[in-house]
Amino acid sequence: VNCNANGSQVSILISKVNGRPDHKVYFYDVEMDTVTHFDFFTGRPSSGVLQSEESEKQKFQETECSGRRPVSHFWDQSEPRLFVCETVPVSSESSSNGYLEMVDVSVVTLFCTQEHGLLLQDYFPKPSGLQALLALDVPYYYFSCKPGESDPCSSSPSDESQPTRGAPANLPHMVSRRALRDFVGLENCEKATRDAMLNFSFYLTIGDMDEAFKSIKLIKSKAVWENMARMCVKTRRLDVAQVCLGNMGNARASKAVKGAEAEPEPEAQVAMLAIQLGMLEDAEKLYKSCQRYDLLNTFYQASGQWQQALETAETHDRIHLRTSYYSYARYLESMGDKTLALAYYEKSDTHRVEVPRMLQDDSSSLEIYVNKMKDKNIYKWWAQYLESQSNMEEALQHYELAQDFLSLVRVHCYMGDIHQASEIANNTGDRAA
């Protein structure tokens, strides 16, 4: 049993008669004398605001949070609406700390109010290296660290003070802190900004955009607007994101997001926003969730993840397989790896043009490649190159290997050997010759 900051709400975890833990966390409203609950097995609250236009977001959240049960819960130290708990899969029977280190633990944050019920605010997997959630005090979650492991979070309470004289150096951190999603980069903001961000997040969650923008209309900081744009990736509100990008002065990102609205899938549109904000992991998940493997392939290529791009093309996006091979070959060529680039030009079936172009400054390697491939088109290209270098004898040999009788006749005529040219034309029956 835990109580919120002003004593108006009490949260309760219970066990069933058979000793198994319940999937729900219960909330008792002291003033209204009512009980509500959030069921982590279904991912739904007993009551709350659900707007029809947000049904897709609701389904996504239910999928992410369902099939779990709560194991610990805390209220924010100063914000009475903010509640957080740790959840594990329902198949996990034990709740001991040692066992929780080995299972999939998620941290779920809720808004709890009389007017709007229970609202899912955020959810994320517990970072590795952390043992258990200890407390919530905006703008930080506080976790205990696993013994013997380094602090996985960049920010820790011990960073705020220097070690005292004579204290042993490199003491392991026992407690680590992680910024809430809405406060990444704003950890040191003043109370007014912190309250405005919380109100913006709350009104954004319930879909009240008028109140959301009223709460932050006086904020001028670009860092705050960028943080709110990041929130829009989680809440999938592109309309709000456009306002945030405008206040950031990021015209390029705004144009890219506007262009992505032509995509039929909402996830693909939000993924472009995530890319513009540098949230690459979120973009990857969004593309996978809507099965837009063509866009995922393009995303991998643009971010330099070529192996993932090729795997995606080979398994899910075969219509762009040759294009992906070609793009990778161009990348390898730009990096100076001509040997591997040659192999991928061949896979993309563009080697007849691209390999001679790539090797034109290395005539010996190009000649070896031409004789190795025994391809008529490549023989013809090499013959034309030799002709341009006035090496007519070898040019004639390669025109003959390419069976380009018109070029044979043309070169013989140029060299004054009309008899040989006439003989080739008569023997081959080539009309062009």
Image: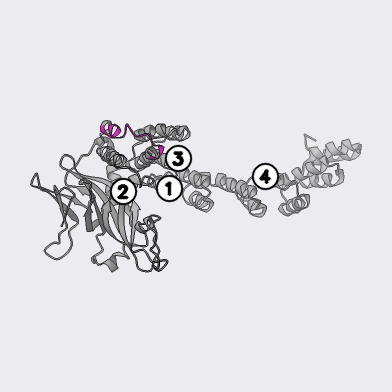
Residue tagged by mark 3?
276
Q: Residue 351's spot in the image, x, y percent?
A: 66, 47
Region rendered in magenta: 211-223
Residue tagged by mark 1?
284
- Mark 3 or mark 1, earlier in chain: 3
Q: Nearer the viewer, mark 4 or mark 2?
A: 2
Residues at circles 4 and 3 in contact by the CB criterion of under 8 Å: no
- Mark 3 or mark 2, earlier in chain: 2
Quadrant of the drawing holding the N terminus: bottom left
Spatial CA span between label 3 and label 1: 13 Å
Estimate how packed mark 2 is, as few (under 14), some (14 to 19) or many (20 or more) residues with alpha carbons within 10 Å: many
Residue 212 lies within the magenta run: yes
In the structure shown, which secondary structural element does the residue marked by tag 1 occupy? helix
User: What is the three-letter code of the residue carrying label 4?
Assistant: Glu
User: What is the three-letter code of the residue carrying label 1?
Assistant: Glu
Q: Residue 231's spot in the image, x, y percent?
A: 34, 42
Spatial CA span between label 1 and label 2: 27 Å
- Residue 139 is labelled as 2
User: What is the three-letter code of the residue carrying label 2?
Assistant: Pro
Q: Give whichever of 152, 58 is nearer the camera.
A: 152
Residue tagged by mark 4?
354
Q: Is any part of residue 261 visible from this angle? A: no
Residues at circles 3 and 2 in contact by the CB criterion of under 8 Å: no
Q: Residue 418's spot in the image, x, y percent?
A: 90, 36
Residue at x 47% of width, y 51% of height: 315
Q: Name the side, left or right, on which 52 lies relative to 173.
A: left
Q: How is the image coloured?
A: one colour
In the structure shown, which secondary structural element does the residue marked by tag 4 occupy? helix
Estimate how packed mark 3 is, as few (under 14), some (14 to 19) or many (20 or more) residues with alpha carbons within 10 Å: some
